[in-house]
Amino acid sequence: KPPELPPGKWGLPLVGYIPWTSKTFEDQVSDFHKQYGHIFLWRMGTQLMVFINDYKLVKETFSRVEFTNRPDWETFKFFEDPAIGIGSSSGALWHRNRRFTLRQLRDLGMGKSRLVEVVQQQTLKLRESLSINAGTPGRIPHQLFVTIINVIWQMVASRQFDAEDKKLKSFAKDMDDFVILSNRLAFKDFLPWLQTIMPEFLFKRLINYHGMVQMKERFFAYFYEEIKNHRATLDPDNPRDLIDGYLLEMETNKDDTETTYSDADLAFLVFDLFFAGSETTTNTFNWMCCFLASHPHVQRKLHAEIDEVLCNGILPTLTERPRMPYTEAVINEVLRISALVNFGVQHMANTDTQLGGYTIPKGTILSSSVTSIHYDNRYWVQPNEFRPERWLDENGKLSMKKEGFLAFGVGKRVCTGESLARMELFIITSMIFQSFSIAPPPGKSINLIPDLSGFFFRKPMYNEFVFTMRKQ
Ligand code: HEM
């Protein structure tokens, strides 16, 4: 390994460092952290991966323009090369789409009562599903995912679907399948030489090429249909949603020869919002259920605050939020302890540069080790404990400390949906626990060990819960 690079594992030519161990990826990263310190390198195949385990260094890194790009990975650019939309793109197109999305989310989402109402209506349906099986052990109903997806559909296309709707069901299935199918594209990114030594048909089979092409066609079919309908009914004086907002900007810029606006870019942007906003928010609420079911004293305090502020069963809006610091503290603590996006979303160095006293060559991938930072005892007292109180000051007021908190990332690509996600989590949590208490099935306990089988998420394991109706 060249000495100017961060310390770490270099391994063999072409294949890099392959660990012969049954340890999880997260545990290996944690071992290398102990061995090499806050910044280390792991050469995977031909790809240089740098892991950063220190909050201040992550903040510095992701605030620098040299580290703003996304990796030039097949996973990000399979549908369109170079990548378009927001989550996978880089450069001027990303910058413009990010500004546009932030503006749209602000205008359509946070603080606007329409979207809050949609979350309320959808959560009422979730309450219905829960009440059907109240008192008996079961999993979190599918309606939770439907609720989250419908909030995004409402925001982008002013639509909502019934849980049994055929289109919604196939859309949800495609989203699940996409995550599984796209995993195999990693062969192209980490072992690109395989393509030169394997017959083309075999390599395509290895990376699930045809499955991915079909997937692309299906996704674009959903979104192109929406774009077509929106264009046909667009009223420039009354934009209804994000698609309308984009079409209007596209029209304003139609004579610009450098324009990056296109139907494909819009479709991709919408696709990104579904991907970035659905699994994340759904799994965070799932973790919430796990932690509340296993910490009855926290649940009691949550119930007490909900009963005091939302008395007589009134539905929560954003007006009540400042009066519910404990609920907010529970949400923050779930986001911290679950460390759901455990390595953040990867960034790439767009030039040769220096970081933490080491050389970082152009094309190096940078990952933040969110789990180790969320459990770093320099920032968190007894980090393994689920303790919402850590988010409250001595007067019981919410203190939104940010040092050491990375659930939504940090820097130039910090999550654009943070406010929306927080709003959804606040409304869903307060409405569900206004009506129900949650516990493990009799004689059982909740498994809080994360499922680490996927690369991007630290999901909760399959757990059953007993939701019991509360007396109002
Ligand atoms: C609890 C829920 C959520 C969590 C934990 C979460 C977390 C994250 C993280 C860690 C990143 C990567 C930041 C980086 O690249 O450094 C991200 C990016 C992003 N998130 Fe979220 N997110 C959540 C909900 C949402 C929602 C509801 C939306 C919108 C519907 C959204 C939209 C996005 C977008 C568009 C990006 C890419 C930003 C960019 O590349 O510039 N997220 N999110």
Image: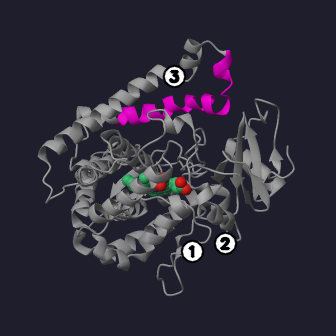
Q: Earlier in the sequence, mark 2 or mark 1?
A: 2
Q: How far apart are marks 2 and 1 (CA)?
A: 8 Å
Q: Quadrant of residue 427?
A: bottom left
- The residue that disc 3 covers is 208
Tags 2 and 1 in contact by the CB under 8 Å rule? yes
Span colored in magenta: 172-197
**Prevailing secondary structure of the magenta residues:** helix
Q: Quadrant of the C terminus?
A: bottom left
Taking the spot 30% from the left edge, 34% from the top edge, the residue there is 169
Q: Which of marks 3 and 2 is nearer the N terminus?
A: 3
255 left or right, relative to 83: left
Q: Distance between the residues labelled 1 and 3?
A: 46 Å
Q: In the displayed structure, would residue 50 be above or below residue 356? A: above
Camera-nearest label, 3 or 2:
3
Q: What residue type is labelled 2?
A: Val
- The residue that disc 2 covers is 381
Q: Which amino acid does label 3 sit on?
A: Asn
Which label is found at residue 98? none
Q: Camera-side residue: 150 or 81?
A: 81
